[in-house]
């Protein structure tokens, strides 16, 4: 019986899905003999060849897929991942960019570009890397933070800016025009305005640029100078002005716009000032995109948050003294103050759990899940959950009205309709909250007086066939934080923002071999709210795997497994403990952590379900 082309392609696809790769490969090759320009067959064959380790042949098939159909976005994206896996980073970024262009820069396609930049790290990418960064930075619908290593490499190699990547200003600084030209170069400006530079060298660069711009007289090309000042001020705003104030400040000028931008290099003024300037200088600002962005962040955006905060401020959510202290901290320092959220990788809840734990049998999970995010903060994780899970209805709770206001502002920008933010304390949840198919509580329980009690309270709202994701601080992974606190002797419960600024300077001045020094390598160290949450939280408990095991037993929960971003960690575990290929024996993970204390630096992140 002769099959039609459509029938042969369908059969080949079924063989491929069922794992019969030799038969699928043979059939695709047969199809391509008579249909050499069938791009889908080339692409599917490329995936098979990739999976069986035939790298050169896979590369050829990917190329044929995009050559026979240059508009085949799926093939460009698959080729990008293939190239990235083989450390051909420039080609990977180029392929991902081609797909993004075909999809008009969609959020999902642009996120893949950011992913390729993240994998590339500090690899030289040339102009294609700059084009990719310009696509991904400054967007609410792309997590651009992951591109930081590629971005830093561009700044480090800039012929003008590279002289400032040191602990002190060079003996001969570039001339003001050269400096302004370097800061306002499109790629440099996009990086500095949109990404916190999370290194001591990056902080030194920003401090030096700020001080030089403050000391400079008005340049003949005032527009470029305004833009340079705005770019650096945008970086300072991202850092929440965590740097020490400059030692000397030039007198302000008569130009209200220049005065406002220059002032923003030191501190923020009231939002109304910037709103007025946006209106009064609208025509002038058309040619000053970064100045306009600065005024928008400092004016309308802050005013929007203040308005939304009033909506969430009715009553006092905190139910005990510890919760009150935590609430007060986040009212003053909402955390994190993020820019963009990851798009893509959408899955149903059953498919997500299956992808995380393919060898674990779980109960039947809902295809249209009700989800509770307990302790949503400023909303990044909650909004990612709303984007990540198909057909999900998400309720996100937090103590802090300021944090919820930031989250709601981002929700409106992203225009997400399947998530609702609500003010509440985990220690006394609303009686009408209902039951949920998934509860996520990440980075929250360890800030409570009784973490296990809060965990237990949440479980009363988990359906019997539901699942829960929990993230907790690791005692072993936070020893540098403990050392920092012991070194500084600063009481987190009473630390002021100015004292945290001073503490940061002391930590940066520590020798590299000091046990507290590693804290200065973390992103959170480089913003005021981040540093406070990271080092000076008013309430913190740290867990061990043994404590987690006891809690799971007491709460009658089954441990499903840890969630890792890097799949290589699980592969390493399986080599060490072949008798536990699913990674479900916590006593084995204790041994792994003893050998690698920083393994859970990003917290113990694990899933569990009721027994």
Image (spheres, rainbow, N blue to C red):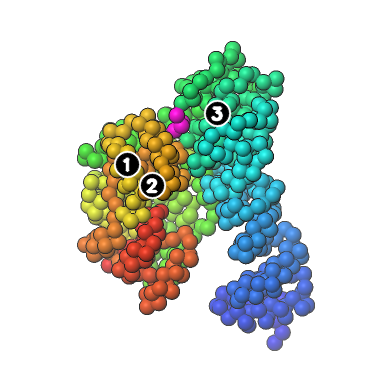
- Residue 482, percent across and down? 31, 47
Label 2: how many Cα within 10 Å (few below 14, some 14–19, many 20+): few
Please give the name of the residue rendered at 49% of the width and 32% of the height, measured from the top-left corner. Answer: 237
Of the 4 image quadrants, the one containing the C terminus is: bottom left
Between 243 and 537, the one lying in front of the other is: 243
- Residue 64, percent across and down? 74, 67
Task: From the image, tell me which residue sits under label 2.
Answer: 514
Please give the name of the residue rendered at 57% of the width and 42% of the height, measured from the top-left corner. Answer: 139
User: Which segment is the magenta one?
Assistant: 240-244
Mark in front: 3 vs 2 = 2
Question: Which image quarter: residue 332?
Answer: top left
Of the 4 image quadrants, the one containing the N terminus is: bottom right
Please give the name of the residue rendered at 64% of the width and 44% of the height, measured from the top-left corner. Answer: 157
- Examine the rendered structure and indicate whether residue 274 appears above or below residue 97: above
Between 360 and 460, the one lying in front of the other is: 360
Task: From the image, tell me which residue sits under label 1.
Answer: 487
- Examine the rendered structure and indicate whether residue 186 appears above or below residue 593: above
Residues at marks 1 and 2 touching, judged by CB atoms closer than 8 Å = yes
Task: From the image, tell me which residue sits under label 3.
Answer: 210
Label 3: how many Cα within 10 Å (few below 14, some 14–19, many 20+): many
Q: Which sits earlier in the primary sequence, circle 1 or circle 2?
A: 1
């Amino acid at each position: 019986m002769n099959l039609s082309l459509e029938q042969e392609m369908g059969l080949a696809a079924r063989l491929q899905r069922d794992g019969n790769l030799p038969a699928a490969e043979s059939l695709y090759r047969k199809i391509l003999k008579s249909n050499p320009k069938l791009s889908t067959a080339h692409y599917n064959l490329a995936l098979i060849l990739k999976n069986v380790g035939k790298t050169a042949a896979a590369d050829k098939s990917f190329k044929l897929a995009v050559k026979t159909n240059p508009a085949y976005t799926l093939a460009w994206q698959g080729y990008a991942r293939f190239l990235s896996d083989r450390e051909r980073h420039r080609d990977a970024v180029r392929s991902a960019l081609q797909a993004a262009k075909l999809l008009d820069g969609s959020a999902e396609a642009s996120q893949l570009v950011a992913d390729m930049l993240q994998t590339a790290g500090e690899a030289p990418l040339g102009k294609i890397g700059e084009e990719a960064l310009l696509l991904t930075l400054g967007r609410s619908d792309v997590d651009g933070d992951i591109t930081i290593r590629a971005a830093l490499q561009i700044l480090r190699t800039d012929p003008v800016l590279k002289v400032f990547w040191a602990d002190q200003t060079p003996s001969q600084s570039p001339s003001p025009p050269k400096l302004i030209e370097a800061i306002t170069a499109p790629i440099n400006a996009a990086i500095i305005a949109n990404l916190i530079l999370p290194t001591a060298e990056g902080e030194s660069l920003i401090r030096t640029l700020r001080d030089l711009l403050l000391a400079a007289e008005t340049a003949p090309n005032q527009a470029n100078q305004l833009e340079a000042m705005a770019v650096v001020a945008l970086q300072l705003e991202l850092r929440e002005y965590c740097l020490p104030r400059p030692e000397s400040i030039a007198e302000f000028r008569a130009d209200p716009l220049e005065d406002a931008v220059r002032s923003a290099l030191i501190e923020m003024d009231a939002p109304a000032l910037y709103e007025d300037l946006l209106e009064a200088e609208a025509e002038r600002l058309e040619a000053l995109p970064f100045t306009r962005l600065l005024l928008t962040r400092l004016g309308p955006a802050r005013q929007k948050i203040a308005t939304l905060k009033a909506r969430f401020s009715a009553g006092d959510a905190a139910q005990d003294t510890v919760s009150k202290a935590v609430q007060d901290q986040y009212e003053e320092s909402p955390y994190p103050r993020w820019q963009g959220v990851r798009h893509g990788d959408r899955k149903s809840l059953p498919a997500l759990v299956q992808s995380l734990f393919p060898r674990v049998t779980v109960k039947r999970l809902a295809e249209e899940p009700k989800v509770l995010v307990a302790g949503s903060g400023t909303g990044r994780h909650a909004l990612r959950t709303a984007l990540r899970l198909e057909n999900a209805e998400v309720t996100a709770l937090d103590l802090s009205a300021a944090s919820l206001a930031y989250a709601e502002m981002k929700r409106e920008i992203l225009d997400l309709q399947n998530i609702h933010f609500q003010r509440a304390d985990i220690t006394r949840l609303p009686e009408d909250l209902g039951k949920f198919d998934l509860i996520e509580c990440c980075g929250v329980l360890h800030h409570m007086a009784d973490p296990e009690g809060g965990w237990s309270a949440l479980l009363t709202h988990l359906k019997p066939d539901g699942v829960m994701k929990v993230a907790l601080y690791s005692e072993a992974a936070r020893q540098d934080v403990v050392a920092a606190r012991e070194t500084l002797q600063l009481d987190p419960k009473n630390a002021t923002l100015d004292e945290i600024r001073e503490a940061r300077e002391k930590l940066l001045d520590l020798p590299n071999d000091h046990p507290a020094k590693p804290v200065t390598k973390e992103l959170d160290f480089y913003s005021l709210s981040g540093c406070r949450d990271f080092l000076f939280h008013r309430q913190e408990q740290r867990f061990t795997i043994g404590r987690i095991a006891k809690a799971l037993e007491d709460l009658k929960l089954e441990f499903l497994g840890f969630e890792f971003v890097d799949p290589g960690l699980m592969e390493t575990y399986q080599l060490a403990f072949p008798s536990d290929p699913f990674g479900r024996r916590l006593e084995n993970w204790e041994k792994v952590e003893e050998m690698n204390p920083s393994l859970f630096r990003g917290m113990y992140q694990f899933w569990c379900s009721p027994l």
